[in-house]
Image: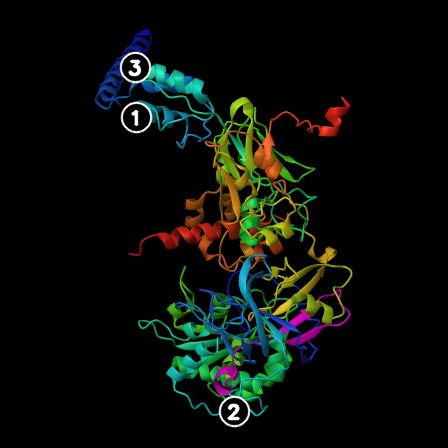
Amino acid sequence: MSKTFSIGGIHPHDHKISINAAIEDFPIMDMAYISVSQHLGAPAEPVVAKGDKVKTGQLVAKSTGFISANIHSSVSGTVTSIEMLPDIFGHLVKHIVIKVEGDEWEESIDRTAQIVREIKLSPKEIIERIAQHGVVGLGGAAFPTHIKLTPPPNKKAEYLLVNGSECEPYLTSDYRIMLEEPEQILIGVKIMMKALGVEASFFGIEENKPEAIKIMSRLASASYPEIKIVSLKKRYPQGGEKQLIDAILKRRVPSMGLPIDTGVVVQNVGTALAVYEAVQKNKPLFEGIVTVTGECMSEQRNFRLRVGTNLERVMFAIGGFPKDAVKLISGGPMMGKAVSRMDAASVKSTSAFLLLTQEETKRGEEGSCIRCAKCVDACPMGLEPYLLNRLSRAGRLEELEENMVHDCIECGCCMYSCPANIPLVDTIRFSKAQVIKIIRSRPKK
Amino acid sequence: MISTIIFTILSLTLLGLILAWILYLVAQKFKVQEDPRIDNVEEVLPGANCGGCGFAGCRAFAEACVKAEDLDTLFCPVGGNDTMKSVAGCLGMTVAEKAKQVAVIRCNGNCDVREKVNHYDGYSSCAVMASLYAGDTGCKYGCLGQGDCVTVCNFDAIKMDPRTGLPEVDEDKCTACGACVKACPKSIIELRNMGPKNRRIFVSCVNKDKGGVAKKACDVACIGCYKCVKACPFDAITITDNLAYIDYNKCKLCRKCVTECPTHAIWEVNFPVRVPRKTESEKNEQ
């Protein structure tokens, strides 16, 4: 029987139209724009200067501070400048601009297709290698993986959960790698299990991907018995850490807590593959699988895209920006971010480019709340979005905190289910940020 | 029958008197000593409860005035100098006259000169929009045009101009309470002295980018070229982070900087229209 999380959730149409598009290598462009802030935490510090020759996979920016990640060149060529360029939100971020000359990789990277099964490194060396190769969580937040794999000393990890649910509509990048590189993913999971010192791991996949469940189950039962494949009911937001833990283990993460508080570490499928490549193949994280999709496009694609590729070039490669598309979203339609600058470049955690037409993306006219409680039913965190919305608009931060606004995961279920088209997430997200800032600023007991 | 009615009336009257006496004793015992001057001061205040003075309302301000040793740090922006004089009169103190201030919008980038690079269709609020991304134009410092300042204004003094997409301050209604200054997430609005004859000069831009970047985003941005600094005979202009700022206490309203500014980012308000100077040849003709 398939499992799922206990409260809230919605069932949007999955629109997985790019499901049959095999992963293809995206051609390398003439310029690469590599941001030094591609992860959660402190931006990395460039270690190259203008005029330096760099190879593909060479370290170009070093992590600073505890929560930070190394950044590697995704191309080989000459650094032409280090300048402030806009990211997809229009904020200026330091970018390393590289003029591409050929594609010469670092010699240490194993470029053969051979699968390396034996894990030689010790747990400590594994974490060092992951940190050195700049692996970050590819589920969306881009949290540095080596920190997630080093739980605080007073807490012990019991299980490793792997998120292969890909519950966002449209996205198929995780599905394609499960189909095309299943064994590499499972080895990646095993590496992370060794690093954490856990005995068992659960690998959750949603039912709408039967092919992936079949392949992964067959492989896991044959060679990796410690990894258990769990079939999950199709439901959004199953891929949220807290929802996945609830669905598979029936455990609840406390408010303002982390999964490790319940003895669990959650990692994404894409991260598992990146860990495999970093540890077994010595390859830093400088490319990722990106779905380029939309109903308005004649052809759906899944690309292996180098970090720092200009978005205009990506659009050009798919035959130009489709005529009736009005919005480009980086990520899925529920939690993705609208791209405001086409001159921005892709980053490590880019998982999809979704093109929507006026019809699909239009917001309905906002009506009055009729207290139908659809948002309350839909909220997977058990909050009351209609109330939080009203309090947010009035700026009543104390009452917002009493009503646990800081627990909101911004999944958008409330707004999706609202019959009055009230922009619930917009207002709640804004006040949530303010409340969390206040909570963090309080002295710890 | 009649005795019952009399007995009832008497007993209730007695009960009422006893309870009234208890209430009187309690009220005497727990009486809150309040300075009668607070009421007097509150009476002369405008009663808008706008919070512009920094207190929760007019009553709180009145209490602060009564407690304060001198009135130099306290000011009611709505009532202005006249109100402060009456307050001082109530309390038997003196108060120095303060220059009248007004809110100015330091963004000049209307739709014609500041090109829109994307279209925002989220919740209509500057604060929410600013938390999401840099804005719908190339300039990340400029006005977002969702009208948070209009919403917070208690005096109906700010309106969005649909032609320019920028807010406009009605200087007759503006009381310089500062609510819009706090509401603006981009810190564009500043309180400046009204100036003699309501004339004032200010830099209508807050773009801190380097000249080239700023100019590319907006035709009327301050590019930090130092021309105004050199032109100013009173050292009133300083440039920090590629942005000029005119100190209104030093500015003598000579308007030299206005003509010098290559991007027309410096604004003059309420000055008479300039008559173009006649050239030598024109003078000779006369």
Q: Indicate whether residue A154 is drawn in magenta.
A: no
Residue A348 in picture, x, y percent from top left: 55, 71
Amino acid at pointer 3:
Leu
Amino acid at pointer 2:
Val
Q: Identify the mark at residue A116; answer none if there is no mark.
A: 2
Amino acid at pointer 1:
Ala
Residue A260 in picture, x, y percent from top left: 39, 70
The chain identifier of the residue carrying mark 1 reads: B
Secondary element under disc 1, as helix, strand or loop, is loop
Q: Indicate whether residue A302 is drawn in magenta.
A: yes
Secondary element under disc 2, as helix, strand or loop, is loop
Please state which of the two labelled residues, at mark 1 or mark 2, is closer to the viewer: 1
Q: Identify the mark at residue B12; answer none if there is no mark.
A: 3
Instruction: Please rate how many residues cluster around mark 3, counting C-alpha atoms within 10 Å: few if below 14, some from 14 to 19, many from 20.
Output: few
Residue A189 in picture, x, y percent from top left: 49, 82
Q: State which quarter of the image contains the N terminus of chain A.
A: bottom right
Does residue A86 appear to the left or right of B58 in the view shown? right
**Can the viewer see residue A373 in this picture?**
no
For mark 1, what is the residue?
B68
Q: Residue furthest front?
A: B284
State the extent of the magenta-drawn residues as a range.
A277-304
Q: Quadrant of the rendered structure where residue B153 is?
A: top right
